[in-house]
Image (tube, rainbow, N blue to C red):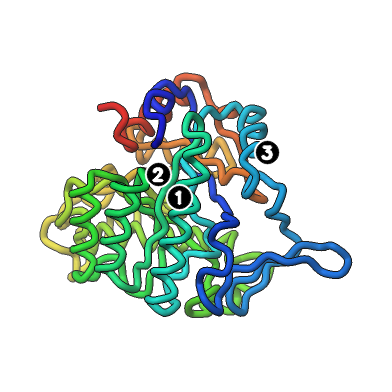
Amino acid sequence: MTDRVALANAQSIDIHAHAVLAGSMGTAGEHGPEIGYTEAGAPWFRVGDYRLDGVRYEGSPFMDTDVRLGNMDAAGIDFQVLSPNPLTYFHHISPRDAVRFCQQHNNALADVVAARSDRLAGFAALPMQDIEAACEELKRAVQELDLLGAYIGTDIGRPLNDPALDRFYEQVVQLNVPLMIHPAPAGIDGPAGDPNLKQFDLDLLTGFAAQESIAVATLIFGGVLHRHPDIDICLSHAGGTMTALIGRFNRACTKRPWVPEHLQHEGAFEESLQQLWFDTHVHDSRVLNWVIDIMGTEKLLLGTNFSGWDQHAMTQDVPSELATTMADNAKRLLRVST
């Protein structure tokens, strides 16, 4: 069980921290996942036909809790909510394999966080290609495993405003948990995407931001937030390029014929943006200030992509008042305070 007293007392809460779980290896059929080493000892990680070379998971904070906690101490992070590795969302594989993987992943995650529930909690992986199975697994993960919410990719095989997903969004609200949305590199287990993204790590550097912006626009223009006003959805990386595009989205509300009636007024998109939560993983204080100017701080959360290639510890980079605000926001989102 999550130590809610420890979570409520935490001064810094990181909600963007992925984990790789030994207990989930080999549970997605032919897709793995699988860890191995070359003859020279270099690590690799396989998901289906995709192989990530040179990233060491074993013995790192991704898989070793003691190493994670030591690094959290060094970064000034009191508490983390662990989430699935974006390489293993598995939203495009067979429903049978996806259900099995998510069940085993969530069981393994629950065991990891239970061992240090004073510092760690978890978000559930879900098989979104089967909406009813996703609802059932989220219910099990929350009620039986004590995971704190749902965690899905931006590309789940259907638009985020697909009416078929209303059943899932209703389940999120009924369980009174947040829904976290984070991108994955295109082509891991789904469509390949723009071939230009295959050089210079552009799938990470620009692809993620584009996916997040599309997700935000789809949730708002597609009426998801209007149909489910009580849902709490958090987007990674401050929603991608939302700060740069806010003017265009606001203008669309009064100029484009397909805009729903409830958004047909000046500033409607920006008003709806206030319903969403965002993390601070933006790398630059100028961008963070821009995010705050547009989105405010009431739903801003600490996010570090802990131990990733682009980790940054915002607890050390922002004024103490903002750090306190983000911790209080996380407690509200995670239902440990009102």
Q: Which residue is mark 1?
A: 236
Quarter placement of the N terminus:
top left
Q: Earlier in the sequence, mark 1 or mark 2?
A: 1
Q: Amino acid at mark 3?
A: Val
Q: Amino acid at mark 1?
A: Ser
Q: Is residue 322 left or right of residue 263?
A: right
Q: Identify the mark at residue 160; answer none if there is no mark.
A: none
The reply to whether callout 3 and callout 2 are in contact (CB within 8 Å) is no
Reading the image, the residue beneath label 3 is 67
Q: Looking at this view, is 141 or 216 the one in front? A: 141
Q: Earlier in the sequence, mark 3 or mark 2?
A: 3
Q: Where residue 176 sits in the image (x, y, percent)?
A: 23, 44
Where disc 1 sits, the SS reads: loop
Residue labelled with disc 2: 278
Label 1, label 2: how far apart the Cα atoms are = 6 Å
- Residue 222 position in % (x across, y down): 23, 64
Q: Residue at x 40, y 35 (%)?
A: 2
Nearer to us of marks 3 and 2 is 3
Q: Nearer the viewer, residue 126 or 265?
A: 126
